[in-house]
Image (cartoon, rainbow, N blue to C red):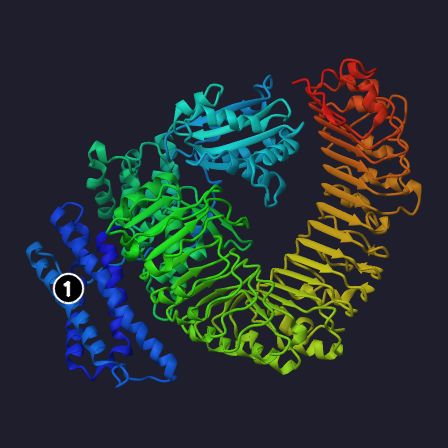
Amino acid sequence: MAEAEAVSALLRVVVGKLAIGAWKELSPLKSVQKDIKKLQSTLSTIQDVLDDAEERSPREKSLRNWLCKLKDAAYDADDVVDKFHTLALRRRRRDGKVRKLFSPSLSLAFRFRMAKKIKKIRKRLDEIAAERLKFHLREGPVSDRRVEIGNRLTSSAVDVSEVYGRDGDREKLVHLLVDTGGDKEVDVVAVVGMGGLGKTTLVKLVYDDDRIKGHFDLRIWICVSEDFDIRRLARAMIECVTQEDCRLFELEPMQLRLRSLLRARKFLLVLDDVWNENEGKWEDFKRLLRGGARGSKVIVTTRNERIAVIMGSIDPFQLKGLTDEDCWTLFRHKAFGMERVKESLEAIGKEIVKKCGGVPLAVKALGSLMSTKRDETEWIAIRDCETWRLPQERMEIVPALRLSYDHLPSRLKQCFAYCSLFPKDYEIRKHVLIEMWVAEGFISSIDEGMLEEDAGNEYCNILLWSSFFQEVAEYLDGRVITCKMHDLVHDLAQSIAGEECLTMEVGSQKNIPERCHYSSLICNETSLTISKFSSEAKRLRSFLVLQPGDYFSHSRSPAEVPENMLSTLTHLRVLDLSGCRIIKLPNAIGKLEHLRFLDLSRTEVESFPKSITRLLNLQTLNLRGCRELHQLPKGIKNLSNLRHLDIYGCELLARMPSGMGQLHNLQTLTMFTVGEDCGSTFAELKGLNLIRGYLEVNNLQNLKNPVEAAEAELQAKRGLRMLQLNWKREADTRPSENVQNVLEGLKPHTNLEQLEIKEYGGINFPVWMTAIAPLSSYTSLVQIKLSYFKRCTHLPPFAKLPSLKFLLLISFPALRKISTEFYGDTGTFPSLESLQFMHMPNLEEFLLAIPGRETFPRLTYFRAIGCPNLTAQPSIPSSIMSLEIQKCKMELLLAGDSIRLGSSLKKLVIYNCRAPSPSWWNRLQYLTALEDLRIDGCEDLTCLPEGIVQNFSSLRIMTIGNHQNLSSLGEEGPQQCLLTSLRHLKIYRCARLSALPEWLGGLTSLRRLEIINCRNLTSLPNGIRLLTTLQDLRIRSCPVLEHRCERGRGEDWDKIAHIPCIDIGLASASTV
């Protein structure tokens, strides 16, 4: 790891611990006090020369050796100081007051042992400090460049769509995928180019292109990297298609599942960042892809053209560097944004850009670097920097990236190098990374009063803006959840970290070098047991067990933790065992007295040993998804330094331990369960006003006294962004007024962004949700979800929430009318985009418009389910693009002016609804902009309305099913068909349907036809011969039709023989 930066960070930590009051308690031993003062002076002297040492060390080997020696001593000093700092904390907790450490209860031997250690480390540092003189280092405070990123972060560093100079490549690649091939079951297209050229970015642009979305039935994206493990790739594909966790572990059932998902479907599979050169592995993987429709494609991104040949690619797509002009455009955007560029800087900038070799990653990194510099001499210094003149053997790391690293603020350099612990293409959870940095002491507040976590957030933003992080996943509000490092950036981090950071794989564990302090272990699906730790590992400060894959996956590793781990790794600050096979935590956990970060998420741990409450330095305890956990440590109040307690998903927790209110440093508390016999502990939240982010409060029916709700002071928790309040219906038998008063006391701060309330038993809403003044003060509230409000008869005036975008109301059985009170005095929902009503059996009227006002100017999605008596007055807003009604009156759909709705509505789902008359269905003809139509389970539908066939020229997907009385899809004779855009038609469970109309022959764009469980269908229309674009035909549970379509012998076989992929009955009749 970069030596000067590491030493600087360590010394800051040691000096900080020496400065606090614990050492004033050592007064009985004056010699110790004297040594401590000398130590503080020595550390200050060393810090004064670190700036110059950092600048010169890359060129002077002897200076690098001095820094290594200094760093080793600094680590040992931190361990010594931290040990006795911990002892002071422990004695304070034991006695409940400050007490001198050298009280008579401590042995004389212990006192002298402690004094000896302090003297030894002081002398060692004195000797190292004296050696600095021979280097003639300049004195001066350690500088710390602060990068001002302003408002550019979200628009540039995060948005991968901002690409320059790739329009031609994009068009060529789209053409390769859409207009070529098709004679094979699967064609492979390889995008080849050096690292940093933007292969992944280009393929992402193509992947999201509307032409690609329309051409392929399925799109699957898999990040492969160096681990071409077929079982892992199969699972990733299944999860990408189903959007669900794959619970299969053996390859055979995975293969069967995958084939069923791909069968008769044209798919696009992206294998990003492939390194595998083993042809046998590729052949094994290709077997997984059988059964898809002809014309399916696989895109491979790789640096190695040989891999393209091995994978059987058509002519590899060679991606070249950007032109100088495109490079300058990208550089100018990153460096200046909308700012005007000085001519002098432009000339120098163009010279700098030429040195980047057309590599966009390098251009972006340098552009970000120069965005904070406007002095011409600074630009000249970068242009003429020695880094550009590195010898050839040191050119593995792009010089531009190294330059950007060299100009990072000093405190960020160690944070960046630490990221080398994560494998390539790993999704790094931002908040977890920040908590690890804090635990290791890498972060100190930039401004007085700023939390270290907030400083860490700024560190991450700088790394994002500098292009060291990329591929960001975000919340709705733009806050970053996860990010990745480009392979070249990861190589740079490893180069900087050196032997101090070690990444290993289970099964190939190495001996840990003497100077290694940070290590990670990568587990794959076959990993079973982690090897025992040797004594060399005792110096480790971080140990992470990592599982490559999606951050949102809940899968667990089969890895078992060795018994000697906790007794060996006693210097740990960070321990991540998430997903490991742990049921019982050993008592030895209490020996990790330096531990600040402990991640046991997704383990099977049931409870904790008492010894865990001895971890007085613990800052983060992550128990997310520990589904077997039924009890938190009773002495959790002793963990006074705890900042983050994540217990989301710990559903068996019946209560919180007493003393939670003593955790005054707590910033994260994801769940609080009110116990049946100790509801009063909820009031302990009163003093925990640093809590922020997400909080879920469960079992509120156990909160007997409304006063206790108010005493928790949720209103004082300014950092709370998401709040969920849950009652239990079965348990709540108290008067509704009492429940309402409880909710009144749970008023959150006005910074709240998302609110969810479940199973509220009150009749009325509290004042803070109904009165105009308090409600309108929630200017940040974006999303509200209310469910199972069995007694409520009115809704609050939610239109007073200026930022509300998503409103979901579920199960309001007492609600009969939604009228003007819903809109307050404004009459407009200015920001609402999605409105959903579900399971409201008695709701009869919904006033959707107020004369003279545009009530929903931005509403695009409306969904009503289980509202059988609901009518909309006067009509559904014309801004709606997606509409879904289930178990509702059909009048809800086209009340009032249906022509206005017809110009905007793109998607319509009708499920289990009844029309007032058979002729009513003809009103659908006005919805001429529809692209996706699904009609399911409507008993009164006997014939497909003519208007659909004749007017829906934009329709791309149509699904008709579960209609027991449907007997016709239109006139039997020739009929003009304008469904010229229809690509997918599915007809299922229509028992009375005996024939398909001839207008099917007019579906000139149809690619997929599914006919399922239509048992009375006896033949296919002759027009099906005309469907030259039809690629996939699936017929299931249609006995007569299946017999007539039997391969080579059926009476209708000649009508379908031209179709590439046919799936009939239980066996496939594919022509492949």
Residue 450: x %, y % from top left: 38, 68
Residue situated furthest front in the rendering: 563
Residue 990 percent coordinates (x, y): 86, 35
Please state if 946 lies on the left or on the right of 377 as rendered: right
Quarter of the image with the C terminus in it? top right
Residue 614 point in image, percent of width and height: 39, 71
Question: In the drawing, does residue 1043 fall left or right of residue 670?
Answer: right
Q: What x and y, as percent, mark residue 686?
A: 53, 78
Q: Secondary structure at mark 1?
A: helix
| Whether residue 208 can be seen here | no
Q: What is the crowding at mark 1: few (fewer than 14 residues within 10 Å), some, or many (at least 20)?
A: many
- Front residue of 155 and 242: 242
Residue at left 46%, top 24%? 280
Name the image quarter holding residue 1042.
Answer: top right
Q: Is residue 750 or residue 808 the one in the foreground?
A: 808
Furthest toward the left, the residue is: 134
Which residue shows up at 49% across the image and 48% down it? Answer: 557
User: In terms of image quadrants, where is residue 379?
Assistant: top left
> In the figure, is residue 428 to the left or right of 377?
right
Does residue 572 sit above or below 632 in this rendering? above
Mark 1 lies on residue = 125
> 766 or 123, which lies in front?
123
Viewer can see residue 989: yes
**Left-right relation of 294 to 455:** right
Q: Residue at x 54, y 34 (%)?
A: 207
The disc labelled 1 sits on which kind of residue? Leu
